[in-house]
Image (cartoon, rainbow, N blue to C red):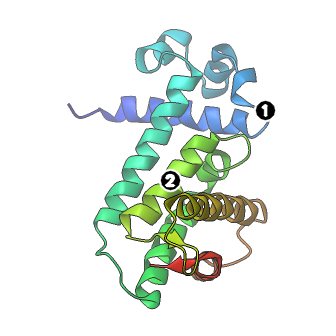
Amino acid sequence: MKENRKTRYTKMAIQDSLFELMGKKPIEKITITELCKNADINRTTFYAHYSDQYDLLSKIENETISWAKEAISNLTIKNNKHENINMLEGIFQYIVENSKNLKILMSERGDINFQKQIFTIIYNECGISFSPAGNENSNIRNEYFIFVVNGSIGLLQHWLKSDMSKTAREMAEIIYNMAVQSGDFE
């Protein structure tokens, strides 16, 4: 069922309120009362859409994950460096366009499991895997993957904190090149 304009506006106001407050303090310190006051809505309206602030954040994260899966599935699997960098650039461009909210979701105040999930989707859906040169041990391969995912999160957080001083293309190249240096990019 399609949402009407008023419902979409209300949800957007609630989400904006959450991001504004999360910019100041962790989610566990945010109350429904202050969320509603900040969004200029009443509690009944909030509870018509969400059970609590964690449900709200979870729904925002799920929408972002759905976007990532859809955006990546619309791209063909890339088999060379140039095409992989172009794909990564598209993802970083989306981050630029949605930086206000993603700055919070990808910050230290955001959910680390969500952040890992995003990069895992990006790398897995694009057919990118990592393994140390000359080593087929699956435990080592998993550790390389974890290392690259967590490093990518750290770089993204730094980029967002530094007001995106590099372009989306530059970030795509940095992430790609660092991943390649960490292990064989297959």
**Which residue reaches farthest left?**
1
Relative horizontal placement of residue 7, taking residue 57 as reference (left or right): left
Above or below, comparing residue 179 to residue 144 in the picture: below
Which residue has dot 1 on it?
25
Q: Nearer the viewer, residue 44 or 162?
A: 162
**Based on the displayed image, in which of its 4 quarters is residue 108 positioned?**
top right
Q: Residues within 10 Å of mark 2 (few under 14, many from 20)?
A: many
Q: CA distance from mark 2 to mark 1?
A: 23 Å
Name the residue rendered at 47%, 88% in the picture. 81
Q: Callout 1, which amino acid?
A: Lys
Q: The residue under label 2 is which amino acid type?
A: Ile
Instruction: Say left or right for 72 vs 164.
Output: left
Q: Is residue 48 left or right of residue 181?
A: left
Which quadrant would residue 182 be assigned to in this image?
bottom right
Which residue is farthest top? 44
> Mark 1: which secondary structure?
loop
Q: Left or right of 72: which side holds 89?
A: right
Which residue bears the numbered disc 2? Answer: 118
- Judging depth in this view, the residue of 39 and 126 nearest the camera is 126
The first of marks 2 and 1 along the sequence is 1
Q: Residue at x 55, y 32 (%)?
A: 57
In the image, what residue occupies the spot 51% across and 76% down?
89
Residue 10 is situated, as x and y percent measured from the top left of the image, at: 46, 29
Query: Where, quadrant-wise, is the C terminus in this rendering?
Result: bottom left
The picture places residue 20, in percent across and down from the top left corner, at 69, 38
Q: Quadrant of residue 114?
A: top right
Examine the rendered structure and indicate whether residue 4 appears above or below residue 135: above
